[in-house]
Image (tube, rainbow, N blue to C red):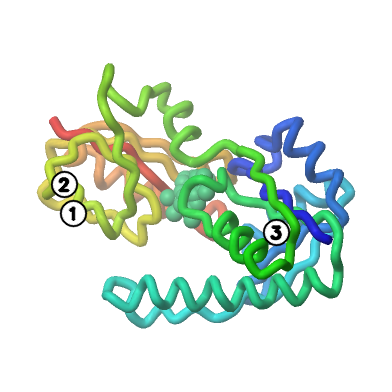
């Protein structure tokens, strides 16, 4: 029977912890999805595998229906895509049983489907067990770079997506970590404070902090610079009501 290690690798090879490295070296191979020809995250996974002497097996990622990414059909489209991924992974694992690794960008606890995929693989008997090994997540790195505590003393922090930012503001939440931003839409929030980071731990890393109304142009320029430097941009920010 096969077992799966879900390994958080942080924001780059420099964040691979000693315990993740040990669990990785115990794997017969690492299984990874390939989106298109060769994507940035697959290239990073190749680098991590190569530096620990573990084979990477890439399988084409099933197409995801993105036609209704804001509407009611979105959860269904994501579920269908997960099902197709599980199917593809189960076929590969049946052909190549053993101890298998999956490298997660950041940590598996935030906006990542690896644990759901592992649960589904276990439910259908494709793997006997799975374990999760933590990595440094983007909010942790943002906090460290800005030398921040994410919450005020005894306070709360709400982690959400760019898509759900408006709903969180309207619900009265006042201390938000915002991830998965297609673009920055901060109209009406000019007096809020922002601590923004792009491509953290990666080529083109950028940091900006201040009052939204004052620093938004600076953030947009930094975002463009990060994209130019790396060929991609991923960003997040902490946003605090005045
Ligand atoms: C699919 S989520 C994965 C999050 C990841 N599992 C974690 O633990 O941080 C991707 C989002 O994380 C954030 N992110 C990931 N890597 C980042 C980086 N190097 N710099 C800034 N934000 C990053 C961005 O908001 C991006 O849209």
Relative depth, front residue between 143 and 79? 79
Quadrant of residue 70 in the image?
bottom left
On the image, numbered disc 2 is attached to which residue?
169
Relative image position of residue 180 (x, y in whole percent):
39, 55
Q: Earlier in the sequence, mark 3 or mark 2?
A: 3
Residue located at (46% from left, 53% from top): 111
Residue 177 at x, y = what percent?
33, 41
| C-beta proximity under 8 Å, tags 2 and 1 | yes
Disc 1 element: helix
Query: Is 167 situated left or right of 178 in this image?
Result: left
Residue 163 in the image: above or below residue 71: above
Q: Is residue 149 above or below residue 241?
A: above
**Quick one: which residue is furthest to the top in this view?**
153
Task: Count neighbours of disc 1 (C-alpha within 10 A) and say few if under 14, some if 14 to 19, many if 20 or more.
Answer: few
Q: Which residue is located at x 81 percent, y 73 percent?
A: 94
Q: Which residue is mark 3?
A: 43
- Left-right relation of 202 to 53: left
Tell whether 74 sits left or right of 85. left
Nearer to us of marks 1 and 3 is 1
Q: Specify the label residue 96 is tagged with.
A: none
Position of 155 compared to 14: left or right?
left
Q: Which of the image's four quarters has the N terminus?
A: bottom right
Mark 2 lies on a secondary structure that is helix
Q: Secondary structure at mark 3?
A: helix
> Is disc 3 surrounded by few (<14), some (14 to 19) or many (20+) residues within 10 Å?
few
Q: CA distance from mark 3 to mark 2?
A: 37 Å
For label 1, the residue is 166
């Amino acid at each position: 029977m096969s077992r799966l290690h879900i390994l958080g690798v942080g924001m780059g090879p420099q964040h691979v912890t000693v315990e993740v490295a040990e669990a990785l070296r115990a794997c017969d191979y690492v299984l990874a999805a390939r989106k298109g020809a060769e994507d940035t995250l697959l290239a990073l996974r190749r680098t991590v595998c190569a530096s620990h002497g573990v084979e990477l097996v890439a399988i084409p990622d099933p197409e995801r229906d993105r036609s209704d990414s804001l509407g009611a059909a979105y959860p269904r489209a994501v579920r269908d895509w997960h099902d197709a991924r599980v199917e593809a992974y189960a076929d590969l694992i049946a052909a190549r049983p053993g101890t298998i690794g999956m490298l997660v960008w950041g940590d598996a606890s935030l906006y990542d489907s690896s644990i759901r995929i592992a649960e589904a693989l276990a439910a259908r008997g494709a793997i006997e067990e799975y374990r999760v090994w933590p990595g440094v997540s983007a909010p942790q790195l943002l906090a460290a770079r800005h030398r921040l505590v994410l919450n005020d003393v005894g306070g709360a922090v709400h982690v959400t997506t760019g898509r759900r930012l408006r709903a969180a503001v309207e619900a009265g939440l006042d201390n938000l970590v915002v991830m998965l931003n297609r673009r920055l839409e901060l109209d009406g929030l000019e007096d809020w404070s922002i601590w923004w980071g792009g491509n953290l731990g990666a080529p083109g890393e950028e940091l900006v902090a201040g009052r939204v109304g004052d620093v938004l142009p600076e953030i947009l320029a930094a975002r463009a610079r990060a994209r130019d430097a790396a060929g991609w941009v991923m960003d997040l920010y902490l946003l605090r009501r005045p």
